[in-house]
Amino acid sequence: MDIKTNMDLLNRELRPAGVRLVAVSKTHAPERIREAYEAGQRIFGENQVQELVPKYEALPKDIEWHLIGHLQTNKVKYIVPFVSLIHAVDSLKLLQEINKQGGKINRVVPCLLQVYIAQEETKYGWDRAELLAAVQQGLFRDLPFVDIRGLMGVASLTDHVGQIEAEMQLLEDLFYELQHLTLPANMKMKELSLGMSSDYRIAMRHGTTLVRLGSAIFGNRNYPKP
């Protein structure tokens, strides 16, 4: 099936549930992204700053670019002027750097806090106790150039559905717990970014508002050789 057919099938499934599709375009050429754009897709997700910036420059400016991968503090300045949402904000240090760079250009930058839910050492993020303590201690309050819109999580890459369900349930529970706390003005629990091509249907049962789908749209990736 082609990109347009894949997207039509996905949107038929996602839209009635109020879930928005982030087309993960990492490693795909601008021509492939434009094909999805011409089929109506406007939100695209990239993992690496060095790949995102040239695509932003080459493609239509009404695209909403989401940075969904691990972000290093020294790369923040390159995307702050245009990025629509940074999903994987996994530390206070990174949040402070986003605030600093946003302040330099007087732009409030939309962000999600990545929470560690997977049983894998390779994943990044806050744990539940750490995040709740940060809220209670007011650590997010004096960051006027960040707009924290919700949470993001990556479940374990496993065929064990019960494990994925449990991990996603942890994030859903934390999301609703935070909704019922008194949060600073720059922090709201509106978005939950959870679910990829292999597990997005499970994520839909756990309140996700954004799913990050790549192979379900573009097919399997051909990674460049090192």
Image (cartoon, rainbow, N blue to C red):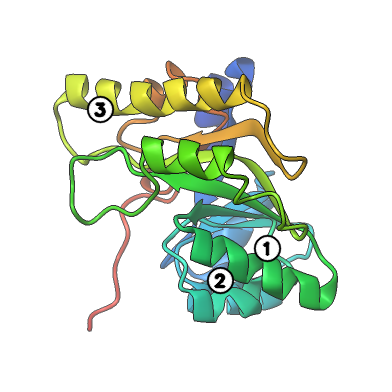
Q: Residue furthest right?
A: 106
Look at the image and tell me in which quarter the N terminus lies: top left
Q: Nearer the viewer, mark 2 or mark 1?
A: 1
Q: Residue at x 77, y 57 (%)?
A: 144
Nearest to viewer (mark 2 / mark 3): 3
Q: Tell me the kind of residue under disc 3.
A: Ile
Point out residue 24 in the picture as x, y percentages from the top left corner: 48, 53
List x then y, in percent, for residue 16: 62, 15
Q: Earlier in the sequence, mark 2 or mark 1?
A: 2
| Residue type, mark 1 in image | Val
Q: Disc 3 designates what residue?
A: 164
Point out the tag, 2 or 3, that comes first from the N-terminus.
2
Q: Secondary structure at mark 2?
A: helix
Question: Which residue is pictured at 60% across the width and 71% down the height?
Answer: 97
* Lower position in the chain sequence, tag 3 or tag 1: 1
Q: Give residue 83's mark.
A: 1
Distance from Cα at disc 2 to Cα at disc 1:
9 Å
The answer to whether the residues at label 2 and label 1 have Cβ atoms under 8 Å apart is yes
All told, the count of numbered labels is 3
- Classify 10 Å Cα crowding around label 3: few (below 14), some (14-19), many (20 and above): many
Q: Residues within 10 Å of mark 1 (few under 14, many from 20)?
A: some
Which label is found at residue 52? 2
